[in-house]
Image (tube, coloured by chain):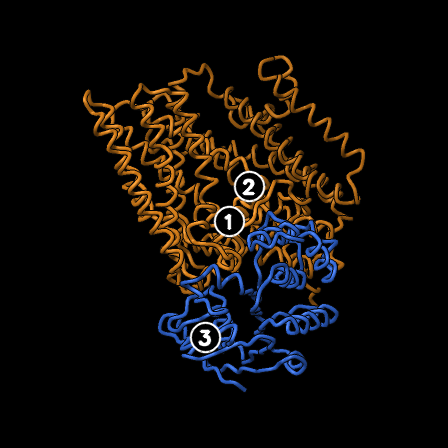
Amino acid sequence: MRPDPDPVWILFRRRAFSRLAYWCLVLGYDFRDRSLTNRFYFVYFLLFWLAWATAVFALLGYTLAGFFVTLSLASPASTIVLLGAYAITAWGLVLFFQVTGGSPFVFSEPDAFLLCQAPVNRRKVGAAWFLMDWIGTVLPFAAASVMLAFALTEASLPHVVTILDLLAYFAAALRALALVLPLQMGLQAALWGVGAWRLHRDHPPARLTWLRLVVLLLVFTLLASIFLPGPRYVLLSPLTFFFQAAFGGFLSPSAWLVRFGFGLLVLALGMAALLVWSARMPLGRAAEETRLQSRIRLSRSALDFEGAEVLRRQSGMKTTRPASRLPVRVGAWMLVWKDLVQSGRSLRFSQVLRWGWVFILGLGIFLAPGWLVKIVIGGVWAVSLGTLATDRLRSDLARWWLLRSLPLRTSDLVTALLGPACVLGLLLGWLGLALVSPPAPFGWLAAVLLPLLVVVAALGSARDILDHSRSRVLLTPAQGEENVPRQDIQGALTVLISAGIPLGLLVWGSSLSNGLFLALLSLPIAALVAVLLFRSVCLIYREIR
Amino acid sequence: MPLLQATALSHSYGTFQALAPCELSLNAGEISVLEGPNGSGKSTLLLCLSGLLRPTTGEITVGGFDLYSDEPEAKRLLAFMPDVPRFYAELSAWEHLRFLALAHNAAEGFEKRAESLLREFDLWEARDLLPHHYSRGMSLKLGLLFALIRPFKVLLLDEPTSALDAYSSALFLRRLSDLKGQGAAVLLSTHDPDLKAGLADRVYFLKNGYLNAA
């Protein structure tokens, strides 16, 4: 009689296979087709991708070898050994803080209900989940190792590379992979073991706090060691020991084998740590910690990046919020109040960067040489600003049942929705102007024109979004703003033309010796475009079907 | 004069007619129940009446104001709660109520009113909670509070008791009776026979997009 199949093993096998089948399908091979021709095709498929990968890595290696020459590195191998040791240390430190902050074992909703409640072998769960994650994590390490090995081979060959050198390339790649992969896997397994150990207790124990402090100290020491060769040598020597065998100069076969053996030892120790610490792992707690994370992964795998971003934002937000103390005013002002409260609570570094980009583009309009370049930069500035200024509009359109229920005049509503972002864009623009201080009278003209340009950019973008919005789509349940259209090429063109004409007149006028009239003409044109766009936006909003 | 009057109202999704031309009126102090099988057009009708979905044909007036040409005036008198309310992720329940009450110019006595409603619907302890932590039942109750926090004459509800517990359902029914007594016109869609039996002054039946008074 055959023994009962292990549920963890079945899950692991099916998930690993389905992931493999998915990627093979993406790359052009369908596992479901079991015909003989498809089996022949499989051989071709493997050879094709092997040749493709070799060509790509050879190209990347060639480029990198060129960099070695440009940078005049005395010994590219020792530089790579050092950088590799720093890179894997940095990765390990990030992973350490991740696994001690939340469970590395991510369980989906079905896992939480079915697997985590069952009396399955925790060790097997730990090993299976680790292996499933490792397959994805190891790819960048493997790719970087092959690329670096190819680059070093390329740099070391005394003659023009021929097809016969392919063997040397493969040997170098294998030599690197044989060291880097066990080392990376062992380190990751050990760190996941720490993550499993943390899960044993309800609250992080004092030992964990001490461990974090020690690691933090290590981080600072490593940062300081960048400038101090002595401590650097001591701190990184356990890692450079392996990287020298992977990428360093010539080592005798026996010396290389010894280091390879140590690499396997690291792997064995890491796996042992994982298996020991995951033996009593509370799966329920791990599932509770990672349910949201699994939803984020699911959204990403379905290419729903916006939904994933919303979930990520939610996971970063607090559970409760005491009532905001911002002063309130009745009517459309409440939309401004809401915008300020929302912006304050969901502020992210990426948003700051986006506004910083708009600011830099604003500076670029005045600093760039030649009026044509200025206009091109101005166009990019207007499109970027328009996209940013309509973020709140899109978020509110996603809550159509609330937005459309408000008893507000459309003009007030549009003003309140776009106003705060326009004010911020304007202030940044004026700050840029103050920093650049272009010569009068064009500087003053630019300062007067700027509010109109900001409004035109925001309205042009809003017009496009509203024009593509449909009530029934806005009313469909959605995670984020995926049911709200984004500004498309048509919208970008509207913004470019609407803002580009007055901006072009100003820039062109300022480049001519008697161009004041042209520059002045930009003001009424911008005002006219702003009024027309505003009316159009209000009309389109009212008529959304 | 009815508080809400729809004439020759119809809606099509492309070539598919979800709602055939129909007449409907809601009178003050009356509760009307809309029933029909899944996909019969109940939600479409409610969305059209609430002004969220523009009808293909027809006119809707609320308190004598046209829902589209006199939108702010009509919306002041109209409240709607969908079957799946969606909230702002960054605002707590209390802040949502404040936002809506003040946007409807109903600032006077807001704090007292909000506290009383939140306590009544057992959401007071969760007033500072961000809404993505709410259960479906809590979300429905909060959606209902959005309507009750400000004055209105017509209330439209899409399957309001579908996820409510027995206590909240009873509370909801009592509230509807109060609203009826205060002269509001209510139209709600439901699959709950008890709700229909206990409350309805008038029943509408929708099938394949055709509306009939039962």
Q: Position of residue B27 (x, y in %)?
A: 55, 77
**A30 or B65, which lies in front?**
B65
Query: In the rendered structure, the residue with mark 3 lies on which chain?
Result: B
Give, as a three-letter code, the residue at label 3. Ala
Which chain shows up in blue?
A: B
Query: How many residues crowd mark 2 within 10 Å: few (<14), some (14–19), many (20+)?
Result: some
> Would you say A189 lies left or right of A533 here?
right
Q: Position of residue A431 (x, y in %)?
A: 43, 25
**A165 or A216, which lies in front?**
A216
Assign a secondary structure to mark 3: strand
Mark 1 and mark 3: Cα distance apart in space: 28 Å
Query: How many residues crowd mark 1 within 10 Å: few (<14), some (14–19), many (20+)?
Result: many
Same-chain status of marks 2 and 1: yes
The residue under label 2 is A340
The residue under label 3 is B6
Give, as a three-letter code, the residue at label 2. Leu
Same-chain status of marks 1 and 3: no
Query: How many residues crowd mark 3 within 10 Å: few (<14), some (14–19), many (20+)?
Result: many
Query: In the rendered structure, the residue with mark 1 lies on which chain?
Result: A
- Nearest to the eye among marks 2 and 3: give it: 3
